[in-house]
Image (tube, rainbow, N blue to C red):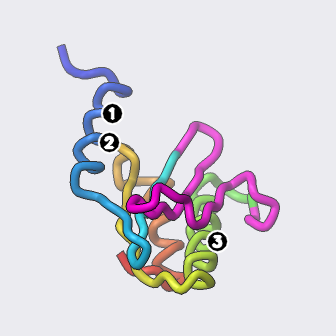
């Protein structure tokens, strides 16, 4: 019998975190996706500090349209906050989710707004 969905996701998350590490110059862009919302954080792992965060629950993010469209808006919002901090490149941490759907939309939105990863 195969792994359950949560076990598979946890295994992928651990594998990604072995190699994905954020510094002050190149923080880790961490994604959390629930059934309803999507969240993104820029994390400096050296200091253990969150530099910036954006989510679909924020007032400045337009939360109308499909979930993928909202994820694109969250990606643009986190990229704008990163550029204000002087961050141009990030290490992408998809948090065990497949690079598909809302996670892909968020990444493409961040790339459109100027982040490099």
| Marks 3 and 1, the one that precedes in the sequence | 1
When the figure is inspected, residue 83 is found, relative to residue 29, above or below; the finding is below
Quarter of the image for residue 5 reads top left
Kindly identify which residue carries mark 2. Answer: 13
Q: Residue at x 33, y 33 (%)?
A: 10
Please tell me whether residue 48 belongs to the stretch shown in magenta.
Answer: yes
Disc 2 to disc 1, how far (Cα)?
Answer: 5 Å
Marks 2 and 1 close (CB-CB < 8 Å): yes
Residue farthest along the front direction in this orientation: 47
- x, y percentage for residue 94? 39, 53
- Up/down of 96 relative to 91, above or below: above
Q: Which mark is residue 10?
A: 1
Q: Crowdedness of circle 1 by 10 Å Cα count: few (<14), some, many (20+)? A: some
Disc number at residue 77? 3
- Dot 3 falls on a residue whose secondary structure is helix
Query: Does residue 34 appear left or right of residue 26 in this picture?
Result: right
Q: Position of residue 63 (x, y in %)?
A: 74, 58
Quadrant of the snapshot with the C terminus = bottom left
Which comes before the other along the chain, label 2 or label 3? 2
Residue at point 43%, 73% (across, down):
24
- Magenta span of residues: 33-62
What kind of element bears circle 2?
A: helix
Residue 42 among magenta residues: yes
Marks 3 and 1 sit apart, C-alpha to C-alpha, by 27 Å
């Amino acid at each position: 019998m195969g792994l359950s969905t949560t076990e598979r996701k946890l295994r992928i998350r651990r594998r990604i975190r072995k190699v994905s590490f954020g510094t002050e110059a190149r923080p880790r862009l961490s994604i959390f996706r629930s059934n309803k919302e999507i969240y993104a954080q820029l994390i400096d792992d050296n200091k253990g500090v969150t530099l910036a965060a954006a989510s679909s629950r924020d007032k400045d993010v337009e939360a109308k349209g499909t979930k993928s469209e909202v994820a694109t808006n969250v990606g643009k919002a986190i990229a704008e906050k990163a550029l204000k901090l002087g961050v141009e490149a990030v290490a992408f941490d998809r948090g065990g989710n497949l690079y598909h759907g809302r996670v892909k939309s968020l990444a493409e939105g961040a790339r459109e707004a100027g982040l490099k990863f």
